[in-house]
Image: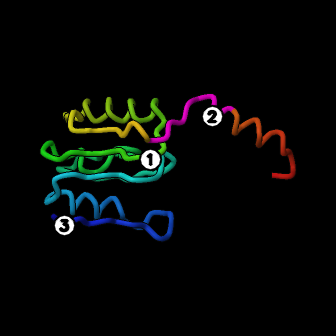
Amino acid sequence: MSSVVVLGAQWGDEGKGKIVDYLAQKADAVVRYSGGSNAGHTVVVNNINYKLRLLPSGVLFNDKVNVLGNGVVINPGVVLAEIAGMKEKGIDCSNLVISDRAHVVLPYHQRLDELQEEALGNHK
């Protein structure tokens, strides 16, 4: 059994999504192991744009297991909206598995972050 890992080194738009989409064609599983919904990538298939923020690119293949792993930071509202958007475009997301150890960001986390930034004032 072999594995392929796509690892970014520049924390930006370096084409990871396109590479994962290409490699997913021959994979049994596509696992996202880190990151959150603060960025994403677009995959175009048959002239349809799929904007992915949390879901692995393999979700576009109905025969792949897709995993949001332990190191992924999941905003439930974002992941649910993304799944709904995929369903609207005819993509079945029943092949998605979310680790019970993934990190979860809730609205109060975001509000605490805003308040901490406000409290710093000009000393951000």
Q: Who comes first in sequence, dot 3 or dot 2?
A: 3
Query: In terms of secondary structure, where does tag 1 sit?
Result: strand
Question: Is the residue marked by circle 1 packed among few (<14), some (14-19), or many (20+) residues within 10 Å?
Answer: many
- As drawn, is 36 to the left or to the right of 22? right
Query: In terms of secondary structure, where does tag 3 sit?
Result: loop
- As drawn, is 76 to the left or to the right of 68? right
Q: Residue at x 24, y 35 (%)?
A: 93
* Residue type (three-letter) at the residue carrying disc 3: Ser
Is 83 inside the magenta-drawn segment? no
Where residue 18 appears, as percent x and y from the top left, is: 30, 61
* Residue type (three-letter) at the residue carrying disc 1: Val
Query: In terms of secondary structure, where does tag 2 sit?
Result: helix
Alpha-carbon span between mark 3 and mark 2: 38 Å
Alpha-carbon span between mark 3 and mark 1: 23 Å
User: Which image quarter holds the N terminus?
Assistant: bottom left
Alpha-carbon span between mark 1 and mark 2: 16 Å
The residue wearing badge 2 is 109
**Range of magenta residues:** 102-111
- As drawn, is 110 to the left or to the right of 71? right
The residue wearing badge 1 is 72
* Residue type (three-letter) at the residue carrying disc 2: His
- 42 and 47: which is toward the camera: 42
Rendering quarter of residue 2: bottom left
The residue wearing badge 3 is 2
Q: Residue at x 26, y 45 (%)?
A: 66
**Of marks 3 and 1, the one in the foreground:** 3
